[in-house]
Amino acid sequence: MKRPLTLLGVLGALVLSASPARAWDDFGHRLVGRIAWEHMTPTARARAIAILRAAPFDSGLRGSVHGHLTSTQQMQLFVFAATWPDVVRDTAWANAQRMERYHHPYRHYVDTFWRQNNDFDPPQAVDRRPDGDLLRDAPRMQRLLAEGSPELKAIGLAWILHLVGDIHQPLHASGRISLRDPWGDDGGNTYRLEIANPQDPPNRQFRRSLHGLWDGIMTETLNAPRPVAPLSFLTNAANQVMHHHPREQFTAELGKREFRDWANESVDIAKRVVFQPPLVRDQAAPAAYKATAFQTAEPRIALAGYRLADLLNQALAH
C-alpha cells in the first residue's frame, strides 16, 4: 500500500513541477512569505489559512491535509501559496488545464521604461507607457479578499502573497532601453551573462540573464538547498534577514502603502544599482557585483515581508 503524501510532500512535488519563472525564485518568495507570517496577527493567520483551504480543488492550492492543521503545517501552506502563481506556469500535459485557468504571465511585472544608451551612461527618462499588468491587477486581487467568493478569495490571496514579493525585485519594475535593446530589455531578461552550462552541446547552450541572477541571488548567496529548501533552513534564513534588517529600519518605507510607490522604488534601484560596474554583458557577473546584488536584495526581501504582513493584518482583521 502506498504511503499517503504529507502536506510537505505534495507542496514540494508541486514546486518541482514548476517551469522557470520570471520572479524571485521559489526560495525568495517563500522567504518573503515566512517573514510576513512572523509579523501577522493570530487573527490574520487564521483567516489566511481558512481562505486558502477553500481554494478550488483543481488549483492545487489548498494542500492535501484534511481536518486540523498543526501550526507548522499552516505556515507551510502559507509560504507555498506565495509561490503558487509561478507553480501554475507548468506546461506539462497533466497540468495544462490548470495553467490555462490560473496562469497570468503579464501580471508578475510592470516595466517602467527608461533609457541608458550604453552601459553605465546616465539614465534618461522616456515617454513610453509601461508594460505589464501588476499595477492594474494587484488592487483587483486585494478587492477579492473582501468581495470575492470563497474560491476567488483564495486565488486573490495567493496572488497578493506573490505580487508583493515580485514588485520588490528591481527588475520587475524596470524596462531599460539601450542601443542594443531599443525596445527594452524585458526586465533584464535579454541582458545575457555567462553560458549557464558550458558542458551542454553548443546547440543546447543558453546564457543566464541578468534577471535570472537577481531572481536567485538570495538562493545562491545563502546556498539554499534546491529545488526546495527545508522548512528549518527557510526559518533560519528568515531570522537572519530580519536580524540584519529589522522592521524598525523601515519606518519611512512602511508608511508607503501603494504598489505604485513600491514599483517606483524598484525602478530607482535598477537605475542606481543593477546596471552598474563591474557588470559586463555576455560575461559572468563578478563576485563584487553579486555581493552588491545580495546587499540590495536582502533588505528588499525583508521590506516585502513586513509590507505583506501589514497589508494582510489590515485586510484580514475580521
Image (cartoon, helix red, strand yellow):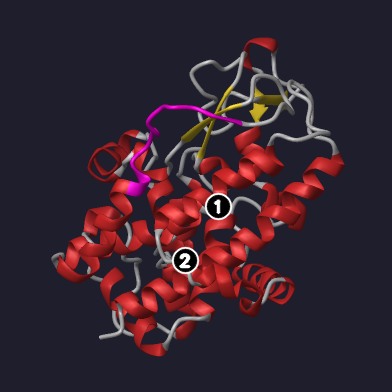
On whether residue 127 falls in the magenta region, the answer is yes
Secondary structure found at label 2? loop
Mark 2 is on which residue type? Answer: Lys
Q: Residues within 10 Å of mark 1 (few under 14, many from 20)?
A: some
Labels 2 & 1 near each other (Cβ < 8 A): yes
Mark 1 is on which residue type? Answer: Glu
In-front residue for pair 162/19: 162
Quadrant of the drawing holding the N terminus: bottom left
Which stretch is magenta?
Answer: 124-135
Q: Name the residue at 47% across, 38% down.
A: 19
Q: Which residue is mark 1?
A: 265
Secondary structure found at label 1? helix
Q: Name the residue at 32% across, 54% down.
A: 138
Q: Earlier in the sequence, mark 2 or mark 1?
A: 2
How far apart are the two marked residues, 2 and 1, measured between alpha carbons? Answer: 10 Å
Whether residue 83 is visible, yes or no, is: no
Q: Name the residue at 27% across, 72% down.
A: 51
Q: Which mark is residue 151?
A: none
In the rendered structure, the answer to whether residue 265 lies left or right of residue 147 reads right
